[in-house]
Image: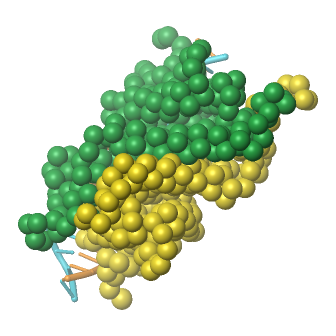
Chain colours: A green, B yellow, C cyan, D orange
DNA sequence: ACCTGAACACCGTTCAAGT
DNA sequence: ACCTGAACACCGTTCAAGT
């Protein structure tokens, strides 16, 4: 009936992902969802993997563009929050992006835009690229853990947190800290980790600036 | 012939993983590899997912135990390097661990041992647990990216790095920095990111100690 | 340019039955 | 306790043929 285009397949894939999760995302179900026969997707994509990469690229595009004002560390925090938001906006979003080494259009554009913004707001361009990469890794790893935990059923959740507790009723200090960290608000844990990266980069930036005081006007 | 035990299935799964990769890791191939019929694995594990979780737990166990001496920041660096080593020791190791929220025996034991070590070497126990979690997230995300890139075929690799380069022959500063970061030695990128986390935590530790100078003898 | 229809070589999982 | 044998309901992918 209505013809389907590449972008429709990607959008349909994300719908199916959100509705049923990554394991249930099947080329056949997606085809049916789009009103097509099983093999028809292979006119649009050479493989399921290619489809997943396009979906990952679409997810990453959801990071958005850097806002105009502010300092470089505000930009980097904004990037981290935007990436976390868009990964969490789709069921198994972390694993989808983790499953495909994305160097497609949107991902490249997003990378360039944010590194550019970091540089324009005073960070050395090398620290911008490497720091951005480090923050990307942290956010990806963090969201994967968050979503992995969130998808446990309540029974599994309680069974597993039971694993952490020792036999005695009075847990030792380390165990208590572990339980606290696992059960804490993911937002708080995320902010903690992100602030480590930001503080580390701020320290580096300061010491670099101290060693070569006129680096910024020497470009 | 020879009977197979749970541990043999996990070990065989890791062999097959290393030999053929995650996509080719099939319950049927694994059964054949162990000299069994297709359905026999389901006596040992309730599902393929449970098998993958046991494999992930086995991989995480490869982190090993903290060495005796040193400072807390040396311990945390040691943990990060150990985790990266063991994830990289198996093909798709990052994605296997990412794919299962592991709270099995080994993973819990490893967590406890390292948080204990961090605490024993002077880090506040809460910072030990939360900082360990942050470093875990960073390492996992980083290794996933590393392995994703490493598994591209040479043709894909060159095709993709071409995507980064603009049409003109003279790339701008930001593009050059991006290409540099992507093509850099993964060890260097890892150390950069890890040092951000460590510096951030050191800074936090110092400022905490400054505010409450006798926190360490008050335990 | 985009899709159907039918086929191929697989999957994960279950379960009665065997030893 | 551990495994076989056979089945069930699916998969991803290909490709001649249609429009």
Say if B169 sits above or below B216 in the image.
above
Q: Residue at x 59, y 24 (%)?
A: A71
C3 and A172: which one is in front? A172
Instruction: Give the quadrant of residue B31.
Output: bottom left
Residue B122 image point, x, y percent = 39, 66
Residue B204 image point, x, y percent = 44, 49
Residue B218 image point, x, y percent = 25, 63
A188 and B94: which one is in front? A188
Figure label count: 0
Q: Residue furthest left?
A: A169
Say if B44 sits above or below B141 in the image.
below
The answer, for residue B194, to whether it is visible in the render is yes
Q: Residue at x 80, y 33 (%)?
A: A214
Instruction: Give the quadrant of residue A20.
Output: top left
Residue B179 image point, x, y percent = 76, 40
What is the quadrant of the C terminus of chain A in the image? top right
Give the left or right position of residue B68, taking residue B42 as reference.
right
Q: Residue furthest right?
A: B169
The answer, for residue B98, to whether it is visible in the render is no
Q: Residue at x 67, y 44 (%)?
A: A207
Q: Residue at x 35, y 56 (%)?
A: B213
Give the left or right position of residue B41, taking residue A48 as reference.
left
Say if A84 sits above or below B102 in the image.
above
B59 and A13: which one is in front? B59
A48 and C15: which one is in front? A48
């Amino acid at each position: 009936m209505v013809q389907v285009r590449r972008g429709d397949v990607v959008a349909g894939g994300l719908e199916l992902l959100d509705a049923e999760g990554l394991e249930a995302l099947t080329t056949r179900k997606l085809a049916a969802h789009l009103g097509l026969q099983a093999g028809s997707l292979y006119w649009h994509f050479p493989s399921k993997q290619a489809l997943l990469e396009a979906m990952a690229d679409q997810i990453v595009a959801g990071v958005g563009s850097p806002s105009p004002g502010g300092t470089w560390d505000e930009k980097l925090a904004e990037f981290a929050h935007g990436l976390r938001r868009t990964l969490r906006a789709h069921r198994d979003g972390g694993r989808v992006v983790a499953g495909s080494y994305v160097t497609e259009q949107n991902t490249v554009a997003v990378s360039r835009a944010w590194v550019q913004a970091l540089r324009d707001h005073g960070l050395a361009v090398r620290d911008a690229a490497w720091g951005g990469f480090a923050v990307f890794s942290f956010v990806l790893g963090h969201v994967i853990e968050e979503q992995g935990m969130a998808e446990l059923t309540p029974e599994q959740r309680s069974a597993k947190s039971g694993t952490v507790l020792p036999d005695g009723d009075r847990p030792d200090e380390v165990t208590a800290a572990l339980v606290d960290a696992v059960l804490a608000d993911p937002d708080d844990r995320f902010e903690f980790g992100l602030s480590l990266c930001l503080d580390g980069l701020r320290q580096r930036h300061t010491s670099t600036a101290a060693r070569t005081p006129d680096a910024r006007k020497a470009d």
